[in-house]
Amino acid sequence: MSAVTERALAPRAAAPTRRGPSGERAVAVGSHTVLGIWSLLVLLPFAWTLVSSFKTTREIFASPFSLPQEWRFENYVNAWRTAGIGSYFLNSVVVVVCALALTMVMGAMSAYVLARFSFRGRTVLRYLVVAGLTFPVFLAVVPLFFILRQVGVLNTLPGLILSYATYAYPFTVFFLMSFFEELPGEVAEAASIDGASEWRTFFQVMLPMAGPGLAAVAILNFVGLWNQYLLPVVLNSDRDNYVLTQGLGAFASSSGYDVDFGALFAGAVMTILPVLVVYLVFQRRLQGAVAAGGLK
Amino acid sequence: MKTPAGPRRKLTFDRVSLVVVFLGIPVALYLLFVLYPFTQAAWYSLTSWSGFTATQEFVGLDNYVKLARDGLFLEAVGNSLVLLLVVPALTLVLSFALACLLTFGGSSTGAVRGLAGASFYRVVSFFPYVVPAIVVGIIFGRVYDPSAGLVNGVLTGVGLDRFTDFAWLGDPSTAMAATIAVIVWSFVGFYMVLFVAAIRGIPAEVFEAARLDGAGRFRTAVSVAVPGIAGSLRTAYVYLGIFALDAFVFLAALNPDGGPGNSTLVITQQIFTTAFKEGRFGLACAMGVLLAVLTFLFTGIVFGAGRVLARRGERTGPRGVRP
């Protein structure tokens, strides 16, 4: 411990701008120390949540740090059944998968046309779509509530899917337009000389070529849609149709003082797990997409 | 107007049908579910609509006058402004500092090198971004728990006994700070990844030149990295500001009722309560319009200031880099 502190403090002692090799190493050690502390700050709450998810509520309150006396999976069973996490999970999967498919299809088609076709009003349409990125969603939710009711899909999964997809649409189009713009025109021309229709050119030639861009947007959208909270809370008040984030939020706040905290922690773990798996599998691609999207 | 793809081509059924279907259906849905509600909100804000009557009574600017005199709403606006000022500033400073440590915090005897194991830190730091915000809120609600929480457990563990039962989220003097800490915590990794990419985009020669001039790492960060990624910083500032004005999910999870003495009540929570709990939809829409105005003002100021600074930079030449 003391060796680490000493070395961490060393760069300050050797402050002058030109350092010898030992000073250089001290800088690296200092960087590692700061980043290590930060990583600990990030990981500790999650590790604590994971451990707590195996404890009884009594154990959680008796000593927040100790390991559970025995590793119980009852909390997971309770959360899955009693708190309804199981059915919320299923709803989330249905809503997110459908909305993701819908927004990807709509976004790719629109981005393709807006990027590669010239027609009257194209610039206006581009602005109209990008404008959707800048408005605060809170301004729209009240009227959206009534529109969904009029269409007859308020408090239903299809209504939620449509809302998810249309609110993810502007970002998807915005991101994909640049991908389609950069695709070489010669390939499309070659396809058309070979007698392919515009439709066929899109589905069989251009769409596959935009694959990396589509994948990046799909992952970003998956994370965003899986984590969505406001839209379901406003537009989906039927308990049977709750999605995971909404169900967990209701579970945390509804039961008041006799919350089953073990089950709450278990529910949190189960909500995190799918995105965590997707993240760890695709982290390189996801971080690349964030970096590419954020610098524009 | 011509596309980069080539000259305007013949209008065939094939081509027209593609444009109509590919653009028509999605845009129609987008107009109906996204853009139409935004314009409707502006109209509702001028009515006294409760949401349950068939017609909406036009009341002009009454709702806005009401809000100007509504002490609770003004408190919420004040808290939102605090978030708007503090959250982006803290997040940007912290994520930029960590990004610098990752990109040129490594040991080097010539060229500036990144840190060994940087990818581990990147993967870990980004993790909170993929966790649903509501879950982050719920977890930290427990982390801050007075008697069984992680924070007080650590603090009493190192001997600070006065924190034995301290209610971070239940005390008006700490509730907002504790909330801000959670929001910043969840966003730092995301912007760190963004800035690492941006710093890597700065030409290596610029770093070499600064190094040859004898600039230390801190000086390099301030004089080379900051101007080099100014565009990314500004974009990040705008995103964070817009987000800080929303922040509904975190606040709903940490302090659903607005915190002790309304110390963490924000505009979006008031919109939600006014619309869906009190059934005053006209008034809620007026709040929404004010939120939008605030958002646009903020965005305009950031981009406007950025432009002025850039112009001044052109006149005097870039600072920190030798001509």
Image: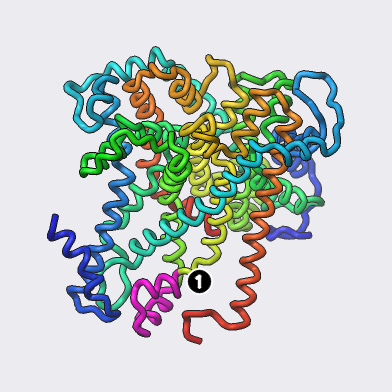
The colour scheme used to paint the residues is rainbow
| Residue found at x 63% / y 30% | B272
- Looking at the image, residue A78 lies above or below residue A195: above
Magenta segment boundaries in residue numbering: B203-225
Q: Nearer the viewer, residue A101 or A96?
A: A96
Q: Report which quarter residue A109 is drawn in.
A: top right
Q: Is A36 a magenta residue?
A: no
* Left or right side of A279 for A208: right
Residue A202, percent from left and from top = 63, 44
Name the magenta segment's main secondary structure: helix
Q: Residue furthest front?
A: B162
Q: Report which quarter residue A241 is drawn in.
A: top right
Residue B200, percent from left and from top = 42, 65
Residue B47, percent from left and from top = 82, 31
Disc 1: which residue: B227
Q: Is B221 a magenta residue?
A: yes
Q: Which quarter of the image is occupied by the N terminus of chain B?
A: bottom right
Other-residue count near label 1 (Cα within 10 Å), few / some / many at <14 / 14–19 / ≥20: some
Q: Nearer the viewer, residue A220 or A22?
A: A22
| Residue found at x 31% / y 69% | B113
Q: Amino acid at mark 1?
A: Pro
| Residue found at x 43% / y 37% | B171
Answer whether residue A205 is visible to the viewer in this image. Answer: no
